[in-house]
Amino acid sequence: MSEIGTFPHPVVDPYSTPFWEATRARRLSVQQCASCGALRFPPGPACPHCFLPDAVWIDLSGRGTVRNWVIFHHNYFRRHNVQVPYAVALVELDEGIKLFTNLRGVEPDAIAAGLRVQVVFEQFDDRFTLPCFAPCAEP
C-alpha cells in the first residue's frame, strides 16, 4: 500500500492494473497462466508454478469461504470515519485463490471458519473500487 494524502491506497503497477480495472467494473479477476493453467494472485510477471510469463485474465465466481480472521478494535486512520470493530479475513475463493479482505454485513461474534461469503464491491474513491466480502445470501 502506498500513502496518498492521509489514507493508504493500493499500489498500481502494470501487473495489477487489470485487477483494478475489473473491480471498477464490479468483477473479480485474476491472472491465469496461459501455459499450465494455474491461477495466481497477486498478479505478477511469471507463473509461480511453471515460471513462464504468459497469462490471461479470467473472472472468478466471487464466492468463497472464510479460513481465518482478525477483529480490529482500534481506528488507525483517525481522519476517516472507520467504524470499529471491523473484520479482516483470509478468504479462500471457490477457485482456490486466497486473499485478505474486509468482511461486511456480519457481526464480529458471528464470524467463524467455514463461513460462506460472496464478493461485494465498495467504491473507495474516484480511482478505486475495493472487493470486500459479505455472508452469502444462500448456502
Image (cartoon, helix red, strand yellow):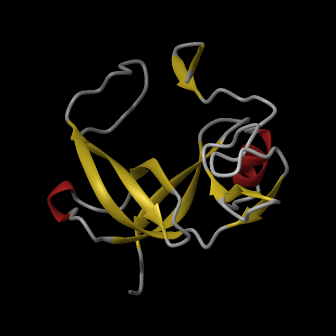
Question: Percent position (x, y) of residue 53?
Answer: 82, 44
Give me the residue at 60% from left, 48% from top. Answer: 41
Q: Quadrant of the C terminus?
A: bottom left
* Vertical order, 77 against 5 (above or below): below
* Vertical order, 106 against 69 (above or below): below
Give me the residue at 73% from left, 35% from top. Answer: 127
- Side of 71 where 104 appears, left or right: right
Q: Is 95 in front, or is 86?
A: 95
- Side of 35 where 104 appears, left or right: left
Q: Is residue 85 in view from this perspective?
A: no
Q: Residue furthest front?
A: 50
Q: Is residue 75 in view from this perspective?
A: yes
Question: Percent position (x, y) of residue 11?
Answer: 65, 26
Question: Percent position (x, y) of residue 98?
Answer: 47, 55
Q: Quadrant of the N terminus?
A: top right
Q: Residue furthest left?
A: 109
Give me the residue at 81% from left, 32% from top. Answer: 14
Q: Quadrant of residue 113?
A: bottom left
* Vertical order, 114 against 36 (above or below): below
- Side of 111 where 14 appears, left or right: right
Q: Is 10 in front, or is 24?
A: 10
Q: Quadrant of residue 80?
A: top left
